[in-house]
Image: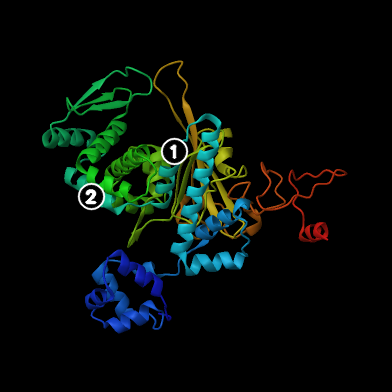
Amino acid sequence: MQNAYVGSRLRQLREERKLSQVEFAKALAISPSYLNQLERNGRPLTVPVLLKISDVFGVDGSFFAPQDTTRLIAELNEVLLDDSLDVRATPHEITEMAAAQPRIAKAMIALHQRYRRAIEQLGQLSADGSAPLMPHEQVRDFFYSHTYLDELDTPAEQLAAELAATHRDMRGALVARLHEKHGLRVVERPQQSVGVLHRYDPESRVLTMSRHLRPDQQAFRLARQLALIEYHDIMAALADSADLISDEARDLAIIGMANYFAAAVMLPYEKFRTTAEEFRYDIERLADRFETSFETVCHRLSTLQRPRSRGIPFSFVRVDRAGNVSKRLSATPFHFSRTGGTCPLWNVYEAFASPGKILTQIASMPDGHRYLWIARTVTRSPGRYGEPSKTFAIGLGCETRHASRVVYSAGLDLDDQEAATPIGMGCKTCERPACAQRAFPPLGRPLNVDQNSTTFIPYPVASKDERNADRG
């Protein structure tokens, strides 16, 4: 083991456990002065102390591994591109901030998000007298940064083991649990109105299900209702800690957590992870084995980040034809921009031209990271003739260093840099000035406007020499 100076991470672990240096040192059977030296990077972390930390506090060695700050750097860069802040930082300064002070960097990003929301609300207030709270966006951001929730995942896995039901029998096992433990009655009825798939009446304790739902869809909603009854306090505490902006956002977060719990019951962590590894992350095969949907499998794959038992780190996204992102999770350095939309060169959008077909793409980001992306459309029908369906494209991506473990890498040259499609985080923040597919000019970069010429690139950026000439 090379000398590892991990003072900030060690201090973070101690503060998370709410222990003083004396208490923390006592738990590790070391002196407080030695711990103080470790936290100040005066001494390196040794193997015996690392093993003791792992045994006492349940964290593995990866907790102290060098942190991949790529996504944090991208988010910081997006903040500093905001012209209204009038801050100019070099790439080196941004990288140094992300590496040395990650918590301060995250605080800056959070403060900038609040600032942007305040500006948008003020503009809306001036226009029509109402200030939108945008609860969906904030809840989406919460789940983007919380891909794995052990407070819900572990009890969901324990519940699945307790029910001991096959996928086909899960609905019946959940109905019995809700009835026997909570006096709740489940009834099926024809869908009375479009869009209402289930409804629970707390007064009568009757949960009504649409007959249009498949057994696995009913089981998911039963597990969701069970979470809202048995684990509401845990979910409420998590929502309270998320600093959400309104009661509506808090309620949406709790619903999202109940859905997370339901997926974890239907796809228990360790059983699902080991099967995913065995199947080389073949999504359709996993959907068939666990009798669930393509989207549910993709979503669950993006949450397999339990310490000591991690799956491949994936990013997950769901978009519509207009480019609106309705779901996003990321356990990778891949950063989804909040401004300017997503990249039109991404194969997630190409999927709409080949409905139901799985597309693969090796994509390279401006920072040099390369990803294997899998994309496919999914369509949901309301179950009635003449009613419009809804179609989304689902994207699932991992860094190419993990791609050999994924069945979709077959036949792809993962080492060919030239074969990768160059994509970006979004047009307004993308660092590729020569991209012909831009929808917006890059923020913070002056354009080369010439009345006497035209270019294939829609927004040609002025070179450094041209900018200096203008200043002269």
Mark 2 or 1, nearer chain start: 1
| Residue depicted at 39% across the width and 75% down the height | 7
In the foreground, 125 or 460: 125
Secondary element under disc 1, as helix, strand or loop, is: loop
21 left or right of 180 in image: right
What is the crowding at mark 1: few (fewer than 14 residues within 10 Å), some, or many (at least 20)? some
Camera sees residue 386 = yes
What mark, if any, has residue 363 been given in the picture?
A: none
Q: Which amino acid does label 2 sit on?
A: Pro
Which residue, given by chain and number where applicable, does mark 1 sit on? 133
Quarter of the image with the C terminus in it: bottom right
Q: Nearer the viewer, residue 3 or 361?
A: 3
The Cα atoms of the two marked residues, 2 and 1, are separated by: 32 Å
Judge whether 122 appears above or below 4 on screen: above
User: Which residue is labeled 2 in the image?
Assistant: 155
* Identity of the residue drawn at 60% across and 45% down: 343
Asked if residue 36 is positioned above or below residue 415 in the image, the reply reads below
Amino acid at the residue labelled 1:
Leu
